[in-house]
Amino acid sequence: MSSVRLARLGDLEVASSCVAGQQFEKHSHDEFVIGANLLGDEHIWLDGRQFSAGVGAITTYNPGEIQGGGAADGQPWRYVSLYVPAAQLAASLGRSELQFERPLQQAPALAHELACAVEACLSDDPLLRERGEEGVTLLLGSIASGAGVRLSAERRMGHAMVTRLQELLAHNLESTPSLEQMAAELGLSKFHLLRSFQKHTGLSPRQWAMQLRTRRAQGLLRLGLPAGEVAHSLGFADQSHLNRHFRAAYGISPGRYQACVRG
């Protein structure tokens, strides 16, 4: 059964496709196009070159390049795609501009990680969508490197910058700043911000904010505040989102936790 799911996160567009025998006429895009092949073989025509992408392959096309091709008639084919505006991709990686040198890389582990990040971006859960955006941004560096892009020297966050971002996140728990806002606040690219913060803390900024949010939820629940009120005050989409993340962190639902601490 064929299915195509699409989502837009700011200027970034992601898609997950499961089709059989899909073919594309020769065409081009204004954006960079990144694809990860998860099932089946893709036969590609790209600016006069012809090649194939098997399972675990990642394809990288520059804006304006003429591409076409697809899967053989009746062949199952599953893949994920990213469509990233040129300025956004360059800024995310700390470059003024860039161009992919190689259109194909065989990287099964990277393709799997990209597929997982795209699935998170397509989730109905807004917190998972944010996590997916972080995952995609982090993977863009590895994908670009595999496509022959030389990344700029990494600017690392010192302890003071990490603390500054943690304070920013803690003061805005009800509405976590966007990656763009965090990067602008610290003067870093999104990619370098995520990589550096994760090296310091073991978490992405949104993961760090979520653990603080659930910790504060625990304190408010201990005081006897209703779970719905706690969820609203801390920026959870609704009480079910609080339930999901609280249980994931502490192995117990908010309601059960309150019943236990009340004795």
Image (cartoon, helix red, strand yellow):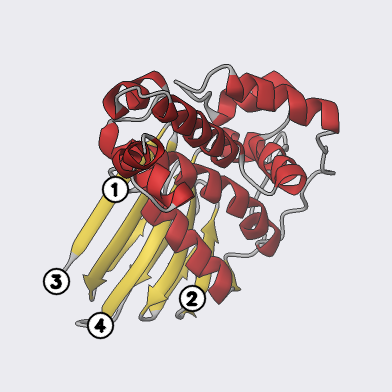
Q: Amino acid at mark 4?
A: Gln
Badge number at residue 50: 2
Q: State the count of labels.
A: 4
Identify the element where label 3 is drawn. loop
* Measured Cα–Cα span from mark 1 to mark 3: 17 Å
Residue where numbered disc 3 is placed: 1
* Measured Cα–Cα span from mark 2 to mark 1: 27 Å
Residue at image point 77% right, 49% down: 151
- Along the polypeptide, which appears first: circle 1 or circle 4? 1
State the residue in front, 250 or 14. Answer: 250
Residue where numbered disc 4 is placed: 75
Cβ–Cβ below 8 Å for labels 3 and 4?
no
Residue at image point 76% right, 31% down: 162
- Along the polypeptide, which appears first: circle 2 or circle 3? 3
- Along the polypeptide, which appears first: circle 3 or circle 4? 3
* Measured Cα–Cα span from mark 4 to mark 2: 19 Å
